Image (cartoon, rainbow, N blue to C red):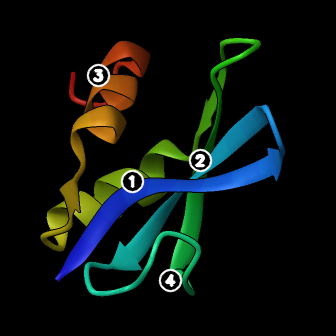
């Protein structure tokens, strides 16, 4: 099963996250299928590759709660 979830990047105390499509059995920093976005909670910046996200959702990928909230704010589900 594939999930859309956050992958932690950045340095200590300055975390930024990539939104990735990854196998559910992989660890947080494990190998991903595709990078589909970027989220910086400190500067409140978000970049989403909406066609790629919609493609994974159509194929049955499940977003985590946080990724779902970020996507909803960006208007992916409208």
- Image-quadrant location for residue 77: top left
- N-terminal label among 3 and 4: 4
- N-terminal label among 2 and 1: 2
Residue denoted by label 2: 37
Query: How far, Cα to Cα, is label 4 from label 1?
Result: 12 Å
Query: How far, Cα to Cα, is label 2 from label 4?
Result: 13 Å
Query: How far, Cα to Cα, is label 3 from label 4?
Result: 22 Å
In depth, the one of 13 and 30 nearer the eye is: 13
Q: Which mark is residue 5?
A: none
**Could you tell me which secondary element the residue under label 1 belongs to?**
helix
Percent from the top left, x then y, of residue 71? 36, 30
Query: How far, Cα to Cα, is label 2 from label 3?
Result: 14 Å
Query: How far, Cα to Cα, is label 3 from label 1?
Result: 12 Å
- N-terminal label among 2 and 3: 2
- Image-quadrant location for residue 67: top left
Residue in the picture at 35% in, 19% down: 75
**Hey, which residue is sitting farthest front in the picture?**
12
């Amino acid at each position: 099963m594939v999930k859309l979830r956050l992958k932690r990047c950045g340095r200590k105390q300055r975390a930024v996250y990539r939104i990735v499509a990854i196998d559910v059995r992989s660890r947080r920093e494990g190998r991903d299928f595709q990078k589909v976005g970027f989220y910086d909670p400190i500067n409140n910046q978000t970049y989403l590759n909406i066609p790629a996200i919609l493609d994974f959702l159509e194929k049955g990928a499940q977003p985590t709660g946080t990724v779902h909230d970020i996507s909803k704010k960006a208007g992916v589900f409208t």
